[in-house]
Image: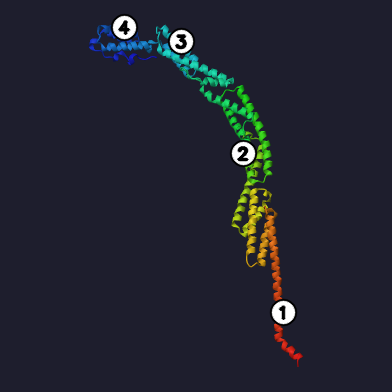
């Protein structure tokens, strides 16, 4: 450390009392500002022994003693080449060339000592600092080399040790990547052992591992351990993609043969989700792409059928003739989905509505051929095999039996009416004949 002693620029700025303008005091002041602190200290002490009340001399004793103890050397006392060499050391230190900087500091210190300056605190501070930096750099190189060798656990152990001195420049930037590398290895081992419960979770973890492995390539030095992990990841990717292709083919076959739409929706969601994840793992796989398109197509078809079921339900709630006919037509168009519980429920509801209309026609008094025809019409709609639910055949049979009885009754009533009307017509004709022609006949036969 170099500075102007006592913090003043020159001794000319000090104004001495007239009584103190003597040769001894001025000589001591000159010695102090020339950096001869020991000589100045001795002179000021001598002045104090003669004039104990000299406050200014006492102050200089304190300054000279302090500067002497702290190793302060004025620049004008230091050799010029020593200062220049020290400045070169600062440049090397700034650019990270610590060993070259240390050589310059030692050279500057030796030049100063040859010039008679044994204690130069500034250069000592420089040397202390550069030694710390060299030690830190050596450890950084050591840890970097250990990381290159793949000794991640050892590097992490050293980095986690507490710092006990000013040696604080450990390569802590290696800490997070090394933890990530160890985490990747752990997940890879779990994937190899098929630890994950579902295929989806396994492939998602594999995606995460692949992203972390790509990150490690840019943050950790390349080494055999990372390369082995990359090979394992590539093998796992191939393994899980092939497994997913086989699994998706089985699921799609099951989807296409399954007509319980709610179960079908769950299967489609699982299949589509897994295939989308697999597509991220193998973006160039045509098999994955085709299977995904098939799964999405089945999803669209299932959604269309479910939407149509909702429309049929709305038609049934209206319960009008046109709506019931439309509901029946829609159910007939979806006959392939008869095993589905929703289809059976809607078919049963439609049949129930048709039976209600049959009952309504039969209960309208008096029973007419028109009512009978309407009842037969509604019953014929309910007779379709696609609409048969539990017990519906018995219900239809009872309705048919009742309609046959009603038909015979209507037929009997019809003949009764015909006979009655015939008799009535004959009677009327007889009356007319008896009224008009009887006197003529009587006159003809009875003179």
Residue 447, position as x, y percentages in the image: 76, 93
Please say whether residue 70 is visible from this viewpoint: yes
Residue 83, position as x, y percentages in the image: 42, 13
The circle drawn on residue 264 is none
In the rendered structure, which disc, 3 or 1, sits on the residue that comes first in sequence?
3
Q: Secondary structure at mark 1?
A: helix
Quadrant of the image containing the N terminus: top left
356 vs 80, nearest the viewer: 356
Q: Secondary structure at mark 3?
A: helix
Disc 1 target residue: 426
In the rendered structure, which disc, 1 or 2, sits on the residue that comes first in sequence?
2
In the rendered structure, which disc, 2 or 4, sits on the residue that comes first in sequence?
4
Alpha-carbon span between mark 4 and mark 1: 174 Å
Alpha-carbon span between mark 3 and mark 1: 157 Å
Residue 205, position as x, y percentages in the image: 60, 32
Report if the CB atoms under discs 4 and 1 are less than 8 Å apart.
no
Q: Residue furthest left?
A: 19
Count neighbours of disc 4 (C-alpha within 10 A) and say few if under 14, some if 14 to 19, many if 20 or more. Answer: some
Residue occupying the point 70% across, 75% down: 420
In the rendered structure, which disc, 2 or 3, sits on the residue that comes first in sequence?
3
Disc 4 target residue: 42
Please say whether residue 88 is visible from this viewpoint: no
Disc 3 target residue: 107
The circle drawn on residue 273 is 2
Q: Residue furthest right?
A: 445
């Amino acid at each position: 450390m170099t500075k102007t002693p006592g913090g003043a620029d020159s001794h000319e700025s000090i104004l001495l009392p007239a009584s103190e303008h003597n040769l001894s005091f001025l000589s001591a002041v000159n010695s102090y500002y020339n950096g001869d602190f020991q000589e100045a200290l001795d002179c000021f002490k001598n002045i104090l022994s003669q004039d104990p009340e000299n406050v200014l001399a006492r102050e200089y004793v304190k300054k000279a003693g302090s500067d002497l103890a702290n190793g302060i050397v004025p620049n004008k006392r230091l050799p010029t080449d020593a200062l220049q060499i020290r400045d070169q050391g600062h440049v090397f230190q700034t650019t990270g060339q610590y060993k070259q900087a240390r050589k310059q500091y030692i050279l500057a210190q030796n030049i100063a000592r040859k010039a008679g300056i044994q204690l130069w605190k500034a250069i000592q501070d420089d040397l202390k600092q550069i030694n710390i930096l060299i030690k830190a750099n050596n450890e950084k190189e050591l840890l970097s080399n250990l990381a290159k060798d793949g000794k991640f656990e050892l590097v992490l152990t050293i980095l986690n040790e507490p710092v006990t001195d000013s040696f604080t420049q450990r390569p802590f930037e290696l800490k997070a990547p090394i933890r990530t590398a160890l985490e990747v290895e752990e997940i890879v081992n779990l994937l190899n052992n098929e630890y994950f419960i579902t295929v989806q979770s396994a492939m998602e973890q594999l995606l995460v591992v692949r992203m972390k492995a790509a990150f490690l390539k840019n943050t950790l030095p390349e080494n055999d351990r990372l390369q082995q992990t990359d090979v394992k990841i590539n093998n796992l990717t191939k393994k899980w993609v092939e497994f997913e292709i086989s699994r998706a083919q089985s699921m799609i076959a099951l989807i296409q043969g399954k007509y319980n739409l709610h179960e079908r929706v769950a299967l489609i969601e699982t299949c589509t989700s897994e295939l989308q994840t697999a597509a991220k793992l193998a973006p160039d796989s045509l098999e994955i792409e085709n299977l995904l398109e098939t799964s999405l197509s089945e999803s669209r078809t299932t959604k269309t059928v479910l939407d149509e079921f909702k429309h049929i339900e709305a038609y049934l709630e209206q319960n009008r003739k046109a709506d019931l006919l439309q509901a029946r037509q829609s159910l007939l168009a979806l006959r392939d989905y008869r095993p589905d519980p929703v289809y059976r429920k809607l078919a049963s509801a439609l049949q129930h509505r048709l039976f209600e209309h049959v009952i309504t026609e039969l209960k309208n008094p008096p029973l007419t051929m028109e009512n009978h025809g309407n009842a037969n019409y509604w019953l014929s709609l309910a007779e379709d095999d696609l609409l048969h639910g539990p017990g519906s055949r018995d219900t239809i049979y009872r309705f048919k039996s009742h309609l046959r009885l009603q038909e015979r009754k209507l037929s009997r009533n019809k003949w009764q009416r015909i006979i009655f009307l015939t008799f009535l017509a004959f009677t009327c004709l007889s009356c007319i004949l008896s009224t008009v022609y009887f006197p003529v006949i009587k006159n003809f036969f009875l003179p």
